[in-house]
Image (cartoon, coloured by chain):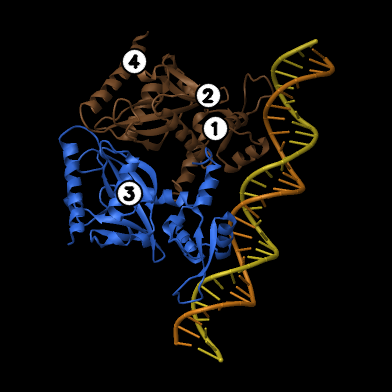
Chain colours: A brown, B blue, C orange, D yellow
Amino acid sequence: MTAEELLKQQATVKTLQAIQTEVESTNRIALSVDCVIFGFDESKLKVLLIKSDLKKYLGKWSLLGDLVFPKEDIDAAAYRVLKQRTGLNDVYLEQVHTFGNVNRHPAGRVVTVAYYSLINVQHHKINILDNELHWHDVKTVTEMAFDHQEIFETCLRQLQKRVQEHPLGFNLLPKKFSLRELQNLYEAILDIKMDRRNFRKKFFAMDFLVDLKEMEQDVPHRPGKLYKFNFDKYERKKKKFIGIDF
Amino acid sequence: MTAEELLKQQATVKTLQAIQTEVESTNRIALSVDCVIFGFDESKLKVLLIKSDLKKYLGKWSLLGDLVFPKEDIDAAAYRVLKQRTGLNDVYLEQVHTFGNVNRHPAGRVVTVAYYSLINVQHHKINILDNELHWHDVKTVTEMAFDHQEIFETCLRQLQKRVQEHPLGFNLLPKKFSLRELQNLYEAILDIKMDRRNFRKKFFAMDFLVDLKEMEQDVPHRPGKLYKFNFDKYERKKKKFIGIDF
DNA sequence: AGTTTAATGTGTAAATAAAACACATTATAC
DNA sequence: GTATAATGTGTTTTATTTACACATTAAACT
């Protein structure tokens, strides 16, 4: 076990002790954040999970979360968890729902604010070495610890809804991508098949795709054109609609 | 001041003391709920607010909220606030967002879970006697206490979005209503004018309206037909779509 | 080198959904 | 009895969404 891994494990243990302290010693409510971290790899939508270290949930998987510090904004706590687990700073992050039933956590009263985030798996790779962490195909996630299954499903539904309203998907792709990869992504998120021509038409009409005048490399078939997403243009257009949808 | 009103005022004062105690005496996070209570009256969308009793926000209006009890589900806390303030039990309630910036509350670290609810003002009337409570036209709400303006606006936007996806509006109307009232409601929520014929067509096509074979009374013009909303039918139809949108 | 394979790239027609639009009817107010 | 102000009702047009087929290209194979 590397020093880095050891540190991470210790951090987790400390967190659980902190929850016990926070909750059992008082009659108060502890606050945590949990992140449903989505990635896209091998044409599959994945979610990053960690092995639970609570005896009650031994062998089950849980979301990545932590207690919110007393002087920390809750969004900042979610970003901190992401940074700690993926090493990434600039990730798409969105709060989804707060889960606060009395008995949701075995250690006592812990209310958790759930976020989902979209990361580019290519940029990441680094910290997956941690063998407690694992990317799971969202279609086979089951039997999670705590109420994390419900949290996960709520976040996935939210992603499915949001991705049809706004072009969030690009946060999951590498900077350069083919339209095929883009369509695979949407099919994976929504768990449906889409018409290729209509899909292309729709995205070209949005006018956020930039033709990089490059072709795919190392594909076992005719290479497709590569594009990038014009984030700036999207942000500018979004600002014109303040108050309508955001 | 009636005994009832006195009790209510005491409850409010006690709550603020509780926040001080919760926060200042420790380094922990306090958790509250805040409810954006919408009503519909005089063809206007209204929100129920209370005069702030904090010196810092003297004269400003705030949302109705309270600390969450240590052994209380957060949804239950929101329902409790509603019951306390409106006397109503069966109200539409939906969690929207959690606001948890470090400095959002002057008494210290208070994270609040925001809900909006839709109530039928006709059934209510009772507790508005409390002169600290007031129904405000949503179009003239401004300068609220704490970050309640932001919370209010977030909830209003959420309502505007949701009402276009699901027929929630009926929760704001009396049991019997004319199509004119229904359209006025939607125009008030969305702050737009709508075409009368297309509006009627749309709602008839949804097939949740029941013709009561009655006419409006005491209107200074030709009376319109009265309808009721078939909540059961809607709930049954909704269940068929589990996992798609809810 | 020639053939096979598997994906890319492209446009049009049909169906559905949304928006625009006008007049006769009815009860009340005057 | 007349004027007023709202209700009630269909059709046309436009925009959006869906369905659908074939030539092209580069790699893989023989």
- Label 3 SS: strand
Residue pointed to by mark 1: A189
First along the sequence among labels 1 and 4: 4
Q: Are marks 3 and 4 in contact (CB under 8 Å)?
A: no
Q: Is residue B164 visible?
A: no
Nearest-to-viewer mark from 3 and 4:
3
Assign the C terminus of chain A to one quadrant of the image.
Answer: top left
Residue at image location 56% in from the left, 62% down from the top: B200
Disc 1 with disc 4 on a shared chain: yes
Expressed as whole percent of the image width and height from the top left, the position of residue C28 reads 47, 80
Q: CA distance from mark 3 to mark 2?
A: 37 Å
Q: What's the residue at 60%, 32% (across, down)?
A: A183
Q: Quadrant of residue B111?
A: top left
Of A59 and A93, which appears nearest the observer?
A: A59
Q: Which residue is mark 4?
A: A9
Q: Which residue is mark 2?
A: A140
Q: Amino acid at mark 2?
A: Thr
* Disc 3 residue crowd, few under 14, some 14–19, many 20+, Cα 10 Å: many
Residue B127 seen in render: yes
Looking at the image, tell me whether mark 1 or mark 2 is earlier in sequence order: 2
Q: Secondary structure at mark 1?
A: helix
Left or right: A110 as drawn, with respect to A164 = left
The circle on residue B35 is 3
Q: Nearer the viewer, residue B28 or A231?
A: B28
Q: Position of residue B178 (x, y in %)?
A: 49, 66
Q: CA gap, disc 1 to disc 4?
A: 31 Å
Judge from the rendering whether residue B105 lies leftward or rightward of residue A6; answer left or right.
left
